[in-house]
Amino acid sequence: MTAVREEAGAVDTTTYRDAMRDALRDALRDDERVFLMGEDVGRYGGCFAVSMGLLEEFGPERVRDTPLSESAFVGAGIGAALGGLRPIVEIMTVNFSLLALDQIMNNAATLLHMSGGQFNVPLVIRMTTGAGRQLAAQHSHSLEGWYTHIPGIKVLAPATIDDARGMLRPALDDPDPVLIFEHGSLYNASGPLTGEWRTCDIAHAAVRRPGDDVTLLTYGGTLGVTLDAAEALAQHGIDAEVVDLRVLRPLDDATIIDSVARTHRAVVVDEGWRTLSLAAEVSARIMEQAFWELDAPVERVCSAEVPMPYARHLEQAALPQPAAIVAAARRTVGRDG
Amino acid sequence: MSTVTDAPVTRDHALALLRDMVRVRRFEERCVELYSEARIRGFMHLYIGEEAIATGVMRALTPDDAVVATYREHGHALLRGVAARAVMAEMFGVVEGCSRGRGGSMHLFDAATRFYGGNAIVGGGLPIAIGLALADRLAGRARVTACFFGEGAVAEGEFHECMNLAALWQLPVLFCCENNLYAMGTALSRSESETDVALKATSYEVPAWPVDGMDVLAVESAAARAADAVRNGGGPHFLELRTYRFRAHSMYDPERYRSKDEVEEWKRRDPIALFLARCDGVVDETDMTTIEEDVAAEIDDAIAFADAGSPEPIEDLTRFVYSEGAA
């Protein structure tokens, strides 16, 4: 991954958090229809400090603190989008998004269709997702897969600093609702910002590490462990390709199938629970579209099916780890363990 | 409670109000027939008995204003200006319908009249109304968003979230709570510890008052007053419009939860009959005959239009899930 970035020409070092903030600042500067609203986005500076300083720069009308009323302010984002604005609604965490699920599913995702094409909803909803910070069962969900079930919305998972910087613009340009999942463990990640973000799309998956022997497919918070696993596999002489799905709905089947058709083996790494996971969907698509290319059953490495425990050793045991990914990849190439 | 039973009413005014109420009443009655003939399917909720509310409120709105309604919204759509043809065609499930046959009775939409549905989740339209009003406020437009919902919605969390948000941000929303006393089959008194609906809004600092929803003049004057206040920067206002539905909740409702005597009692306050009595000497039988004939012709025409409509090709099934031409 580092090699890929250097090739693209590193120009700046930043963090995922700062990259996201810069994207928000650009959006607020460039389009007066854009405003940010959510819990503690203003005076507090954002629960994860993403919007720090934006209130001072853009004022309380455009960086709008809300009460703890997820359904009302997400729905208000839908209404404001219908009214001609380009709202960015921040839901503090994916766990709280369940309180707004009615608005997301019954209104944002359906209005265009129910109205026979009359009312599109150009709304961006950002939320933090994922585990790994000992926040226990109610603050550690990975529900991206749930949201990808819903026709009418798009679902993004920026896993890199370039995507954190670049995905917001095309999301705002999109005429339909777009959900952006920011993994909480990524905010402090730092690294070079390449020029790639300027041409960022929200249509394609990305090959983060080219390889020939097995395709490791993942997204969001597990890109890091998957790349680590790929390096470990290289020590075993297995050349793994890592595909970052990036856009979870609609999935970029072409990139997925192209990779699997070359490597003939696939491991899907997903922080969501295994049952009915996004990994299940990716696996099914590979089976449907590349069955005859496969030299081994598709493997899945997902989170253990437990509410996330607090204790660090238990939490880490529940999450996809490089060792499990390595083991799965080795099974696909016929080398157990 | 807001009533204006002794206010003077001119002939033109009376005819306009009567025409609106009769249009909705007859349209709904024909819908029942069409439903029994299986021409209309799905869930269908009738506005019979409640016509005075949409009649009175819509007259307080301008074309720039927005309307968010519920699944019992045929009357709101018609009186907002959505063509009877387009509404009927929608219920026939044809492409000429106001939602191209993708919404049905509960999801009438019309961009031209800023009619934002047609929402079948109780309370689900309130946040949308808040957002439409927020957009107007941020854009500096002196518009009103009228948001209709039933008293059943006050039990939803969204109601309370939206009352608070509307008042906190002083948003230009006219909340119109159509209190017909039953959330499907559950009486208000069986579901709320505090049954004074207007008081609930007042507790959020939203000016609110009850209105006799069977008295079209009372509704009209209350709506005009409230809409003016909203339009002139007075923040959200709330009308609790006390009414009653004369028909079942939907076409599937056996009405085991209320007595026939109660229904008959309320029918004595039929908004059309009540207003006709009030118009004695202003409007005569010939006027009513003309209105009835015009309305019947309009509905006949709407049915013929819907009947001649074209079903959307199956190939177009997945259109409008995402905007066309988008990446």
Image: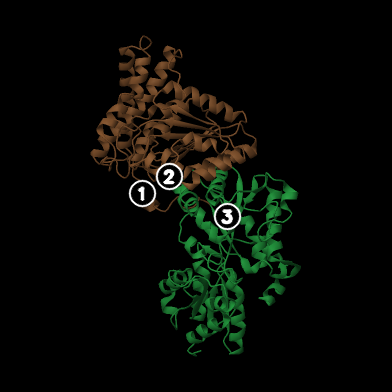
Chain colours: A green, B brown
- Mark 3 packing: few (<14 Cα in 10 Å), some, or many (20+)? many
Instruction: Tell which circle, 1 or 2, labels the residue nearer the N-terminal end.
Output: 2
Is the C-beta separation of discs 3 and 2 under 8 Å?
A: no
Q: Chain of mark 3?
A: A
Q: Is residue B267 left or right of residue A309?
A: left
Query: Which amino acid, by three-letter code, is at mark 1?
Result: Pro
x%, y% of residue B47?
35, 33
Query: Which amino acid, by three-letter code, is at mark 3?
Result: Ile
x%, y% of residue A26?
70, 53
Residue lying farthest to the left in this orientation: B37
Question: To which residue does mark 1 refer?
Answer: B313
Q: Is residue B253 left or right of residue B114?
A: left
- Mark 1 packing: few (<14 Cα in 10 Å), some, or many (20+)? few
Residue appearing at x 53%, y 57% in the figure: A97
Q: Chain of mark 1?
A: B
- Mark 2 packing: few (<14 Cα in 10 Å), some, or many (20+)? many
Give the structural element (helix, strand or loop) at label 3: strand
Question: To which residue does mark 3 refer?
Answer: A125
Is the C-beta separation of discs 1 and 3 under 8 Å?
A: no
Give the structural element (helix, strand or loop) at label 1: loop
Image-quadrant location for residue B3: top left
Q: Is residue A83 visible?
A: no
Whole-angstrom CA distance, mark 1 to mark 3, is 33 Å
Image-quadrant location for residue A165: bottom right
Residue mark closest to the camera, 1 vs 3: 3
Residue appearing at x 35%, y 11% in the figure: B280
Question: To which residue does mark 2 refer?
Answer: B122
Q: Chain of mark 2?
A: B
Q: Are marks 3 and 2 on the same chain?
A: no
